[in-house]
Image: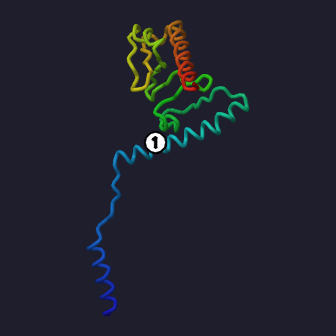
């Protein structure tokens, strides 16, 4: 009975002196972890998925999802990138907003059309009123593709 009392006392003492240990989860730690995950996933896609798609003649990969079923890529990136020849020239946000890449050459056309900037990157939102104007969309898209190509050419130097 005395040994049991000592053990019980020791357990109570330890429980009283060691409170719960909680990790300090800060926004910075969450951001760092998320960025590491995105970097790893993007690297895997670039190193493995894209070469396999090219090998088998697949130019475009579309993921269809059902209503109320989360799309893992949408969750990962917060939207979709639209690519041509490995260059992203447009993005589609999780809310369906289409934005086209801009640089100093095609930016004046986007500004003249009143297209607002979509975030911090050089992309400009296509307004809903312009969605039905195929000629405008085609001209703006060609400008966005050219902007992406110019950016890639500048990086290769």
Occupied quadrant, residue 63? top right
Residue name at image x 57 percent, y 24 percent: 157
Residue annotated with mark 1: 35
**Is 132 left or right of 56, judged from the image as shown?**
left
Q: Front-most of 11 and 116?
A: 116
Judged from this view, the residue extending furthest toward the right is: 56
Q: Is residue 87 above or below residue 138?
A: below
Q: Front-most of 62 and 82?
A: 82
Q: Is residue 152 above or below residue 133?
A: below
Residue name at image x 70 percent, y 30 percent: 54
- Where is residue 123 shown, x and y percent of the image? 45, 21
Mark 1, other Cα within 10 Å: few <14 / some 14–19 / many ≥20: few
Residue name at image x 43 percent, y 18 percent: 124
- Where is residue 25 shown, x and y percent of the image? 35, 52
- Where is residue 122 shown, x and y percent of the image? 44, 22
**Is 45 left or right of 90, judged from the image as shown?**
right
Q: Is residue 111 above or below residue 33?
A: above
Query: Which structural element holds mark 1?
Result: helix
Occupied quadrant, residue 142? top right
Q: How is the image coloured?
A: rainbow
- Where is residue 101 shown, x and y percent of the image? 48, 19
Occupied quadrant, residue 113? top left
């Amino acid at each position: 009975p005395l040994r049991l009392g000592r053990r019980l006392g020791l357990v109570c003492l330890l429980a009283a002196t060691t409170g719960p240990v909680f990790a300090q989860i800060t926004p910075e730690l969450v951001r760092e972890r998320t960025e590491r995950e995105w970097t790893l996933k993007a690297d895997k896609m670039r190193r493995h998925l894209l070469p396999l798609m090219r090998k088998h003649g697949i130019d475009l990969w579309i993921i269809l999802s059902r209503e109320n079923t989360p799309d893992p890529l949408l969750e990962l990136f917060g939207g979709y990138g639209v690519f041509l020849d490995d260059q992203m020239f447009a993005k589609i946000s999780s809310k369906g907003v289409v934005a086209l890449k801009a640089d100093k050459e095609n930016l004046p056309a986007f500004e003249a059309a009143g297209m607002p900037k979509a975030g911090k990157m050089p992309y400009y939102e296509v307004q809903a009123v312009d969605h039905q104007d195929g000629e405008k969309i085609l001209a703006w898209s060609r400008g966005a593709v050219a902007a992406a190509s110019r950016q890639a050419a500048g990086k290769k130097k």
